[in-house]
Image: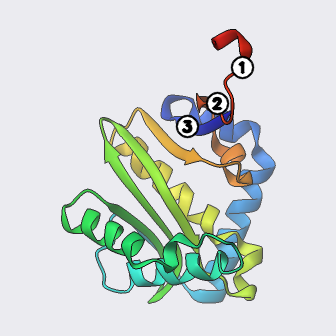
Amino acid sequence: TTEIYTLSLQDALPILLRKRKVLADDRRRWRRLEELLGPLEFTSDDLRNDVLPTCFAWKSERYRNLKRNLFAMEQTREFFRELQRCGLLRVSTLRAGSKLLGIWLGVVQGGRWFGMVLAFNPEKSLSKYSVGRQLLYPMLEESYREGHLEFDFSIGFESFKRYFATHIRAIGYQGSPPFHTW
């Protein structure tokens, strides 16, 4: 099955407290990142001109060796630019000064914050700080403050989703349906 990982925001604190080691490690990484680069700045909806092109470049680089690099296609990039022009795309960022560290593209609709793309700075010197995950903490706080019912990480089995998700929802079967559904 294909699955979507979600975080029910009312359940967030107990889950994160059970994973104390991850939370403590991430807090330590945050402090060390600030020592290295200066104060970190979270922006819930960053409209600066450098964000989308940087996100596209990071994702293209990450998927360069795959057969389907959707972010190398102009149609994909135009789709996200149009969502932003229409006011539907929420672009969250984590920065240290002018240096972009992490970018999240998503949509807020019906009391839910849906994730579409998570990109993070590919510099080797930053990899030990988990900058993509560092972006998630202020996003989850913002989502909670805004009263969202759910934070939807979308499909995929990336490890960071397992740290935060409280629910997994099957959205459909891949391939032939099981015999009992015929």
The amino acid beneath tag 3 is Leu
Q: Are marks 1 and 2 in contact (CB under 8 Å)?
A: yes
First-in-chain label (2 vs 3): 3
| Residue 178 marker | 1
What residue is drawn where x is 39% and y is 79%? 74
Badge 1 element: loop
Q: Bin the neighbour count of mark 2 within 10 Å (Cα to Cα): few under 14, some 14-19, many 20 and up.
A: few
How far across and how far down the image is residue 181, in percent? 64, 13
Q: Quadrant of residue 12?
A: top right
Q: Nearer the viewer, mark 2 or mark 3?
A: 2
Q: Nearer the viewer, residue 177 or 93?
A: 177
Give the alpha-carbon distance from disc 3 to disc 1, as whole Å. Answer: 28 Å
92 sits left or right of 10 in the view? left
Residue placed under numbered mark 3 in the picture: 7
Q: Bin the neighbour count of mark 3 within 10 Å (Cα to Cα): few under 14, some 14-19, many 20 and up.
A: many
Quadrant in which the C terminus appears? top right
The amino acid beneath tag 2 is Tyr
Badge 3 element: strand
Q: Are marks 3 and 1 in contact (CB under 8 Å)?
A: no
Residue placed under numbered mark 2 in the picture: 173
Q: Nearer the viewer, residue 37 or 180?
A: 180
Q: Are marks 2 and 3 in contact (CB under 8 Å)?
A: no
First-in-chain label (3 vs 1): 3
Q: Bin the neighbour count of mark 1 within 10 Å (Cα to Cα): few under 14, some 14-19, many 20 and up.
A: few
Give the alpha-carbon distance from disc 2 to disc 3, as whole Å. Answer: 22 Å
Badge 2 element: loop
